[in-house]
Amino acid sequence: MDYAISDHGDAAPLAVKILIAGGFGVGKTTLVGAVSEVAPLRTEEYLTHASVGVDDLEGVSGKSTTTVALDFGRITVNSQLVLYLFGTPGQERFWFMWNDLVNGALGAVVLVDTRRLDVSFASIDFFESRGIPFVVGVNCFHGVKDRTQEEIRRALDLDPQVPLVLCDARDRTACRDVLLALIDHLMAARSHTAPHPVA
Amino acid sequence: MKHWTEGFDDDDADESLVRPYTITGGRTTSERNDLTLITLVTAISEVSSEAERRLRRMQPEHRTIFALCKRPLAVAEVASALNLPVSVTKILIGDLIETGQMRTRPPLAFAQAGGIPDMTILEAVRDGLRNL
Ligand SMILES: Nc1nc2c(ncn2[C@@H]2O[C@H](COP(=O)(O)OP(=O)(O)OP(=O)(O)O)[C@@H](O)[C@H]2O)c(=O)[nH]1
Ligand SMILES: [Mg+2]
């Protein structure tokens, strides 16, 4: 079984990713850590570098430069396929990286915390407006289920086709099921639409 | 003891800025903009003696990358292992590609193509997740 035009003479597998998005403190890193085969890795990027542009970082040490950090995990699916999970915050200051983040993404999980649904609005808007498939994972902190799924859907103004799954971000099986809900959602979308060339 | 789930702060970002751009010889952007966070990079084991000579003249970080990538690693994994920003890491990896010491496998651009991934990929991911 081969997943792509393999004119790459080597044995490198194909890399795909799922984005784990949502507002501040909703449990993104926790979810990544729950399902990853390695402890979540952290990587940084210069904010000024990408947003200011190419020209001058001369004397950069004198400027106040910020970095943004993302964490990610890895699941080796088989010898030909590896899945990366990237925790991606919803704040606008990260959006300069989203082209790169979205590249190779199968889709996204938007995590929400029912006590602070609003912190995940920006992530939902982002994927909706770009037509990137996603599911919503409701992280039930301390088993709190203070709102019905219908109430949450209404508060999020969620398209009825977008699956919503309750989970505990610390629980491996629960997180795996959220990821599986995304894959099922993608498969359903795939069978409803004419096959689209992937390139 | 600090647990890995606790983030480290950005306090040392400013001091650490000088060193990364020294490694790149002052370059702040990669000439190759085709490298992505999950592009897999692999060291080519059977490099020419000329390439080996070049590698010896490069920065220690280049040699570290070359050694790390005996097995395929994503650009993000290399950046994380070197504790360098992604943009700096891309420049260094670009150097190794230029000199014929590494090969890459880019991801498939599903979202940009407005497409849903191939069924065989989705099935493989589903089976992989079920085995977790
Ligand atoms: N009780 C409980 N605590 C949780 C759960 N998920 C996450 N937490 C805790 O909530 C806090 C925030 O979780 P993180 O995984 O760091 O959230 P995050 O979305 O990565 O946060 P940022 O990266 O800062 O935006 C941590 O202290 C977690 O231990 C959960 O399901 N139940
Ligand atoms: Mg986090």
Image (tube, coloured by chain):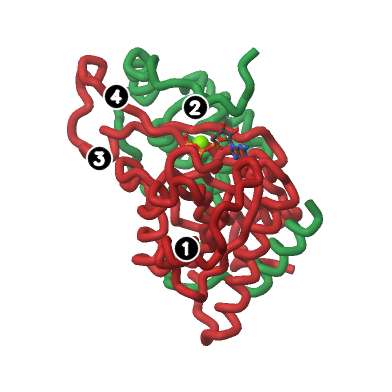
Chain colours: A red, B green
Q: Would you call the spot at circle 3 few (<14 residues within 10 Å), some (14-19), or many (20 or more)?
A: few
Callout 3: chain: A
Same chain, labels 4 and 3: no
Q: Report the residue at 31% width, 45% height from top.
A: A92
Kind of residue at badge 2: Arg
Q: Report the residue at 52% width, 61% height from top.
A: A107
Marks 2 and 4 sit apart, C-alpha to C-alpha, by 19 Å
Marks 3 and 2 sit apart, C-alpha to C-alpha, by 33 Å
Question: Considering the numbered disc 3 on the image, is that residue within a helix, a strand or a loop?
Answer: helix
Nearest to N terminus: mark 2 or mark 4: 4
Residue B54 badge: 2
**Residue A9 visible in this rendered orientation of the protein:** no
Residue that badge 3 annotates: A51
Question: Considering the numbered disc 1 on the image, is that residue within a helix, a strand or a loop?
Answer: loop
Kind of residue at badge 1: Ala
Marks 2 and 1 sit apart, C-alpha to C-alpha, by 33 Å
Q: Nearer the viewer, residue B106 or A187?
A: A187
Q: Is residue B105 left or right of residue A63?
A: right
Residue that badge 4 annotates: B26
Q: Nearer the viewer, mark 1 or mark 4?
A: 1
Q: Nearer the viewer, mark 3 or mark 2?
A: 3
Q: Nearer the viewer, mark 4 or mark 3?
A: 3
Nearest to N terminus: mark 2 or mark 1: 2
Image coords of residue B116 (percent x, y): 53, 72
- Determine the image quadrant of residue B25: top left
Callout 4: chain: B
Q: Are marks 1 and 4 in contact (CB under 8 Å)?
A: no
Same chain, labels 2 and 1: yes
